[in-house]
Image (tube, coloured by chain):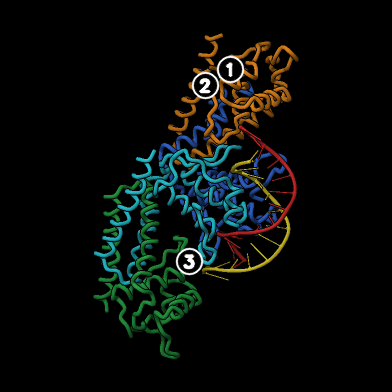
Chain colours: A orange, B blue, C cyan, D green, E red, F yellow
DNA sequence: GTGGTCTAGACCACA
DNA sequence: GTGGTCTAGACCACA
């Protein structure tokens, strides 16, 4: 299955789901025009409330990531990031800095940190690669 | 001023503040033994409630970043995480994943991402090294 | 009722509550996965403010004793301290020293003290064992 | 020196001092009639404010542990615990239980716990023994 | 001066 | 329903 929820992560379920859709879109697992899973079956499969899935989709629609065709379902839109290259880099650096600062406080050295980063990149690529083969 | 709050960010104020203290420690702006701003004046300056600053400091204390001497104030501790290797790794992976997902949202590819990570590691090393040499 | 507060003890209410949750966990009255009382009803029952109960729970969460599922409630975690061996030992020695000093105040000699310690260890083992067998 | 303050312990300094006097009395390092160190030199030696020492002595006097002879200094009184044997045991069990519960949450097993208890008993006996020889 | 505790009450996010 | 954040303000303990 494409999406997995960690109920103990503390991260809101609807955000986990929205992030995973965004990730699938960015990694190519979902391509423009592709249909998203319907709300009811997906909610059942993930064992979450339908409202939670609907909220995730609503968030994605409001951000222009997906669009809803009434009666037909939700589909991935063309990817056109609303930010300039410079703004995007600044946003990303903020996230990277938080990880670097955390590594400092957790006394994780540079080599170990880079190894972990590569590990996580592999992990996400593997996940989306597996999904691609399923298409 | 050392710290600044973005009231529109949606991120809880106390977490913004705690993150900024961690950032100051990682970049060498705050060094072990240094006093942190007193709660009351800082709260006034940031225009937040005393309790909100206190909550940020409490979080930092519970994570071993600062310590409080009763009646005297709060001070930056030696960098010595109280958590097990396993817990530290889990905390760090959470941060890394957020950066990785953000990179994908923003369509930054693996090589560019790793280059940015190295750049930020260099940046923090340079900064904290420079501060040390100034003493 | 499971918990009770002594308002005259001088010990902070939130610490009394956190200690009692820990006691319930150690004695088997609360088991991993069990839900804790919801904050609002518990606050009403104990006649304290919601925030005070929330503070007790936050302390327990930061120490890995409980976890909170957003929108659902708080639950007892598997007993798995997030702290390093060194930190755990330091925390424990603090508690032991208080008991040792109290024994001296009360003129309880070493043999009687050790006998009491063994008695209490037996007591907790018996209690948590009995609870397990009841399942 | 007889007393030592840990400024980082989080425990109020005056309480640390009062406890150490009580401990010295219980262990025989201080005997009824013995003079306590004068406030000023002691404050200097411990590098604390004179008020802090005075507060510790005031607490001890109010509890009948010491008495003040104006112009002469403070002296240890006859030790007569105001509690019955039963009450004393109940007080002590409360302290012991807190240590036992803490051991449970820190996953320190019975043998290790008992070893630690013996270690701390030795530590305190050694401390007071050394003081005795100094008399 | 310092930080800590607690209340009353508002408002929000989430399931 | 659940917990989380934040404020305003009182009162306390400590150095």
Image marks 1 and 2: residues in contact by CB distance under 8 Å: yes
For this view, does B112 lie left or right of residue D131? Answer: right
Q: Is residue B123 visible?
A: yes
Q: What x and y, as percent, mark residue C94?
A: 39, 58
Label 2: chain?
A
Q: In this view, does B112 lie above or below D67?
A: above
* Quarter-of-image position of residue B27: top right
Considering every residue shown, the one lying at the far front of the view is C134
Disc 1 crowd rating (10 Å Cα; few below 14, some 14-19, many 20+) is many
Label 1 and label 2: CA atoms lie apart by: 9 Å
Where disc 2 sits, the SS reads helix
Where disc 3 sits, the SS reads loop
Q: What x and y, as percent, mark residue A5?
A: 55, 26
For this view, does A72 lie left or right of residue D56? Answer: right
Check if mark 3 and mark 2 are on a common chain.
no
Residue at image coords 62%, 30%: A92
Check if mark 1 and mark 2 are on a common chain.
yes
* Quarter-of-image position of residue D122: bottom left
Q: Mark 2 points at which residue?
A: A124
Label 3 and label 2: CA atoms lie apart by: 50 Å
Q: Name the residue under label 1.
A: A27
Badge number at residue D10: none
C9 and D11: which is toward the camera: C9
Residue at image coords 58%, 21%: A44
Q: Mark 3 points at which residue?
A: D12
């Amino acid at each position: 299955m494409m999406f997995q929820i960690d109920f103990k992560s503390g991260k809101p379920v609807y955000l986990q789901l929205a992030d995973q859709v965004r990730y699938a879109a960015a990694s190519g697992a979902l391509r423009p025009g592709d249909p998203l899973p319907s709300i009811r079956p997906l909610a059942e499969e993930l064992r979450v409330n339908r409202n939670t899935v609907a909220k995730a989709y609503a968030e994605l629609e409001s951000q222009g990531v997906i669009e809803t065709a009434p009666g037909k379902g939700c589909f991935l839109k063309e990817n056109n990031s609303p930010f300039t290259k410079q703004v995007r880099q600044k946003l990303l650096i903020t996230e990277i800095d938080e990880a670097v600062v955390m590594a400092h406080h957790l006394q994780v050295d540079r080599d170990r940190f880079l190894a972990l980063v590569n590990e996580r990149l592999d992990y996400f690529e593997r996940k989306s690669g597996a999904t691609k083969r399923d298409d």
